[in-house]
Amino acid sequence: MTAERIHQKLHERALALGSKLDELSIGRIWRSAKTYREHPLVPMFRSLVQDEIDMSVLHMTSEAIRQLDLRPEHGEWLSSRLERCLQIDDFSSSASALGELRAGGALLQGGFQVHPIAENRNPTCDFQISCNGLDAYVEVATKQMSGKTVDYLNSSSDSRERSICPGGAPDPNKDGETIGENAGHKFASIKPKAEQVPHGSVALLWVDVQDEDWWPADITHTKPVVSCNGDFYSGGIWHGFYGSPGTPLFEKQSTEERIKREQYTQSYPGLFSQHDLWSAAVLSFRNGTVVFEHPSPANSMPEDLVKQLLALPGADYSDWWIRWPSAQSNALYERIQRTFNELSSLAEVASFSW
């Protein structure tokens, strides 16, 4: 009965996902075995059945499928990714396929020509994209939960709801480890060698952060630091790209004098500190799209490509870290250096915790 209801609601809302899934497939997914998590389509189905206010991931996924389905040249690729989405014995593969579908569809919505790249023995990017005579390559990564957290949830017999940290909970035996630092480390570890990037090419690392594992994360976590009720926090994602060992982070520090003084610093190099092969990273959240440009890439994004990225669904320039529209090649680098200085100054005065 639930599968029939889901299928009916997908059609009632004219969601493209409904035309690609029959009731039998929906039922298999709905009843699939649960380990530490559910099949990545199940939370979308549940939001539909329960008429939840936030159905953004379901709508973005369906719109991406619609965009791809409108173009016959993508038919074979679309079918292969949908087949992977329906796997019930490997949820990570299903989640990765959904991330690729959302990326391809969003790029089409943004006005790019999208050409999926066939897999072979050598590492390759997922897409080659074109706009205004300019080409670039796109590699898609779907963020999922840390291995330690998965092992903990799979081995635990406690059926009660628990708070979890997708990037890994701080190790009580390690001084200075924070939730934000662990989250940042997950991003700093994405495709670290960029082996997929063709020599001399503009390359974008597209990070899909819409999987159930990372639903708590949104564009707010891309800021170097935020404050709430007088306390300062670092989501860690900005550090995962731009930070370096010694960069200050915050986890409930305050300027108000409390029991102890405690300062946290990053212990690993951010992704852009490791090499210059990724021209930029595109972070796709359920509530927006953020672009982090490499401050000194081997191959810079042309201005027309940057402006086309502004047409991506959910794009908000105010959250982006890019050189454009400045004509100075070091504009982004100087902005990052100013932020380092501001974080260091803030760490001197906001260092009290309980």
Image: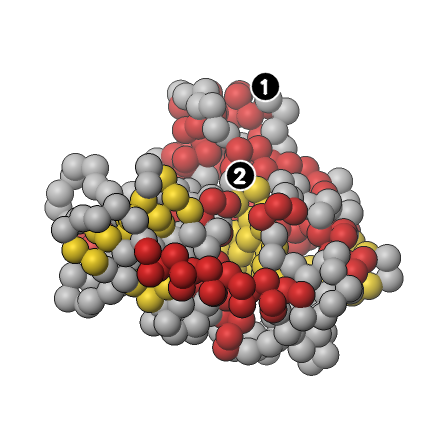
Q: Residue at x 44, y 23 (%)?
A: 52
Q: Amino acid at mark 1?
A: Glu
SS at circle 1: helix
Whether residue 81 can be seen here: no
Within 10 Å of the Cα at label 2, are there few (<14), some (14-19), or many (20+) other Cα atoms? some
Image position, residue 5 (x, y; %)? 46, 20
Q: Residue under circle 1?
A: 12
Disc with the residue nearer the chain's start (1 vs 2): 1
- What distance separates the C-alpha of mark 1 from that of mark 2? 24 Å
Name the residue at 59% across, 19% down: 12
Left or right of 64? Residue 150 is left
Above or below residue 216? Residue 332 is below
Pick the front one: 261 or 177: 261
Along the viewing direction, whichever of 136 and 253 lies nearer the viewer: 253
Q: Amino acid at mark 2?
A: Asn
Circle 2 residue: 287
Tell me where residue 337 appears, x and y as whole percent.
54, 67
